[in-house]
Amino acid sequence: MSTLRTSLSALPATVVLVAVAALASGCPAPKPTPGGNASPGAAAPTQGIVTLPESLAAGAAAGNGPGVAALLAGGADPTELDAEGRTPLDHALAHPEHEEGNLAVLTALAGALRALEDPHPERAGGTPEIDLNQIRVKLLWYDPDTLRPTEDPERGVVILKIGTKVYPDLDGEPDWELLHQDLVAFRDQFRGGSPRGLPVMVDAREQVSDAHVGRALAAAARARVSDVTLARQPWEEEIVEDPISILEEEVVIDGDDVIVDGEKHGKVVDAYGVGGGAAGAFGQRWGKVPLAREGGSEGTESATDAALRWLKRHQSPDGRWDADGWRDHCADEACAAADGAAAVEAGDGRYDEGVTALSLLAFLGNGKTHRFGEFKKTVHRALTWLKRQQKADGSIGFTEGETIYNHAFATAALCEAYAVSRDFTLKKFAQKAVDFCLIAQNPGMGWKYGVKTGRNDTGVTVAMLSALHAAKTGKLNVPSESLDGGRNWLDRATSTTGATGYQTPGGGSSYIPATKGKFDETPVNTGAAIFARLLILGQPKQEDICRRGVNVIASNPPSWPSAGETSKVNFYYWYYGTLAMFQMGGAKWREWNDALLAALVDKQRMEGCAKGAWDPVGEWCIAGGRVYATAINALTLETYYRFERRQK
């Protein structure tokens, strides 16, 4: 698929004039070089936003055509309302005398848009940024006999759709006036997403003529919607999604039923895609299992909810969580650590993608997605920002060294979001991220800081295995050999005692030089390895290597005696250790859980701007700051339902 998102107000008028002249002479318009015809100082077309009335004004400045061209050449504001509530553009487009000239201008505009299509060099394959919080006007190319999509450019008819609605055919043309009316209605109902108002995408198959594309653009222009993008893509079997124009409706779960604004709207699985491959692995998050049975309580859920609300309040406007700049979003009294706590409030700015992904996973782990629950706007913005960070090779946030964790966490977040929401627009981004994981893996082994470095470590390997597990749950392409390689490394790094080392069998944990000696060593890699063995790799609980590893974890329970006594605080270890012990179950799990709750729940901040957060006093907080501490502890408290416990 190719797409253009550009500010046409900066596009030189000669581009559209050439297209108009070529159209009048019956010759195809030449393809200009992006930015090549611009006057000195004019900005080259780049990815941005198309605002249609401004685009028409910029493109039809010659004034030698009837209707729209003459109107705009006269300097009139095409969107100014008259006493009848209509605009000059409405009148010009509706005037029968000008129909041919109007269509020529709009067709030329569509042709100019196509000629300037230039996929963004830093986006995976130049794929368009389509999300469910916009109206998608589809112009499909169907075989008139079979009423199925066709590739034949000579035999086909244009079908106009929004979501599942097919617009009627009027004498061989879709009902453009009805489209205009619907867009006006959508615009008036719109309450979420873009602060500028309702965004619209015109999504046309390659076989659809520029004239039809022009009419769709005209309908959007007349409706005075805000942002309009144009995407042209080749024939493919259609995937249908309904537009979502209201993001924050009140949705609650009553058993398996979805209740919206007090009315029953079907089952969770049907309404929000928590089914298929995701039902087993992720289905516990909706209509949650009895918390007390698994070790949770109203207190743990209250703590998780407070953490999510802190994350929501400290999200940046562009959708990220800023590892070192999150305090810009504090209230009048900035977040501060409790008395006696040696906190590292600001993390490392290189890990914005990583802490954003962990925060996203915390919302997803609690059953909150961009399609479901009260945090839809928060999740939607974060997903949009994360997609924008993906490079052409599929990597997200990876530059060098430890930033490989950014990519692993981001891949897990995109894949989980895709698996639980069935939002097909996430699929290409998620699969591209998975493909980079596979490229980076050492043949037959695990991962380290880079692409096929020949070295392995347990921390990166389990982070990558977690991402592949989410991808496999979402039925993305994950070769079994990649999981086998991860297990090969874990086996190599595990000693006969059951302890798994960082880079050697049973060896020590990784550490940050700046914090060396300040924290007690913990078996974090053993916790990560046992979690991966039990949940991701499917090894039986009774395997000797699993039982010995669990014993190592059980002998090192969580401990946080006081705000100032933090040498044993390692949120990263507690996260993996809790996941591993939950999967094992039994008496050792209950003992671990009691220690976890004593260490974690009572230390959550419950006053001021910091309400819901945890002070960043743990070993790895120097990398992610308070955002990391709060996100990973929320994930830990979601263990009771985040992943289904394996029975064997």
Image: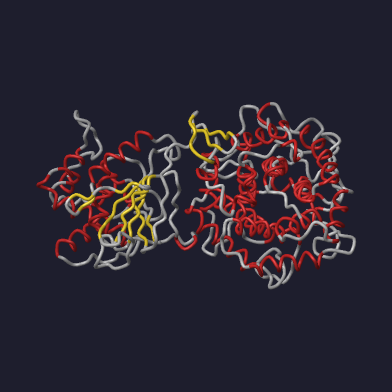
- Say if 352 sits above or below 314 in the image: below
Q: Nearer the viewer, residue 491 or 384?
A: 491
Quarter of the picture containing the C terminus is bottom right
- Say if 263 sits above or below 592 in the image: above
Residue 532: x and y, percent? 74, 57
Q: In the drawing, does residue 557 fall left or right of residue 479?
A: right
Q: Nearer the viewer, residue 590 or 322?
A: 590
Residue 552: x and y, percent? 87, 53
Question: Based on the displayed image, in which of its 4 quarters is residue 440 positioned?
Answer: bottom right
Question: What coloring was used for the rendering?
Answer: secondary structure
Question: Based on the displayed image, in which of its 4 quarters is residue 255 positioned?
Answer: top right
Residue 504: x and y, percent? 83, 65
Q: Residue at x 23, y 64 (%)?
A: 29
Total labels drawn: 0
Q: In the drawing, does residue 612 fall left or right of residue 3?
A: right
Q: In the drawing, does residue 606 fall left or right of residue 560?
A: left
Q: Residue at x 34, y 49 (%)?
A: 137
The furthest residue to the left: 97
Quarter of the picture containing the N terminus is bottom left
Residue 397: x and y, percent? 60, 56
Q: In the drawing, does residue 360 fall left or right of residue 60?
A: right
